[in-house]
Image (cartoon, rainbow, N blue to C red):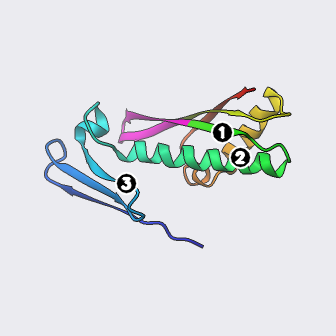
Amino acid sequence: MAVRTADARWEGTLKEGNGHLKLGSGAYEGQFNFNSRFENGVGTNPEELLGAAHAGCFSMALNASLERAETPATYIHTVAHVNITREDGGMVISKIELTTEGAVPGLSQEQFAEAAQKTLEGCIVSKALSAVPMTVSATLHS
């Protein structure tokens, strides 16, 4: 199977330093710093990239599941909210909330929600992040 790579470099102190992230594919390269990670500064952060990976994996997995059930989706769109909080041991990812929507001809809202929940449990990235509490909210559009 495939091996994916990404790299990061950090220079300077925690609060005044700067980092640079790069995906092995070349699809993304950018800066991050304390403000972009823990406040609202310019740049990305590891949690945002983790959320993008989770939303992408989940959308593909839900689409594949629906296709295998012979109810292919017209589209699936997922947003990941990665919550960071301070706990006794420091900063932690305390919760990931996925909000997904899609158009799936012939499927009911209940069936779509059930498929989304099963996908949350089986998605590769969800499995990798299984130590973090996760929820999924699913809305079917016609």
Mark 1, secondary structure of its residue? strand
The residue labelled by disc 1 is 76
Kind of residue at disc 3: Tyr
113, 134: nearer the viewer: 113
Q: Position of residue 50 (x, y in %)?
A: 46, 47
Q: Position of residue 16 (x, y in %)?
A: 13, 43
Rounded to the nearest angstrom, the CA distance separating label 1 from label 3 is 23 Å
Rounded to the nearest angstrom, the CA distance separating label 1 from label 2 is 7 Å
Quarter of the rendering occupied by the N terminus: bottom right
Kind of residue at disc 1: Ile
Residue range in magenta is 79-96
Kind of residue at disc 2: Asn
131 relative to 135, above or below:
below
The residue labelled by disc 2 is 63
Circles 3 and 2 in contact, beta carbons < 8 Å: no
The residue labelled by disc 3 is 28
Q: Label 1 neighbourhood size at 10 Å, few (<14), some (14-19), many (20+)?
A: some
Give the side of residue 41 with respect to residue 132, left or right.
Answer: left
53 relative to 85, above or below:
below
Does residue 127 appear anywhere in the picture? yes
Rounded to the nearest angstrom, the CA distance separating label 3 from label 2 is 24 Å
Q: Position of residue 3 (x, y in %)?
A: 51, 70
Residue drawn at x 57%, y 38% is: 133
Q: Position of residue 58 (x, y in %)?
A: 62, 46
Quarter of the rendering occupied by the C terminus: top right
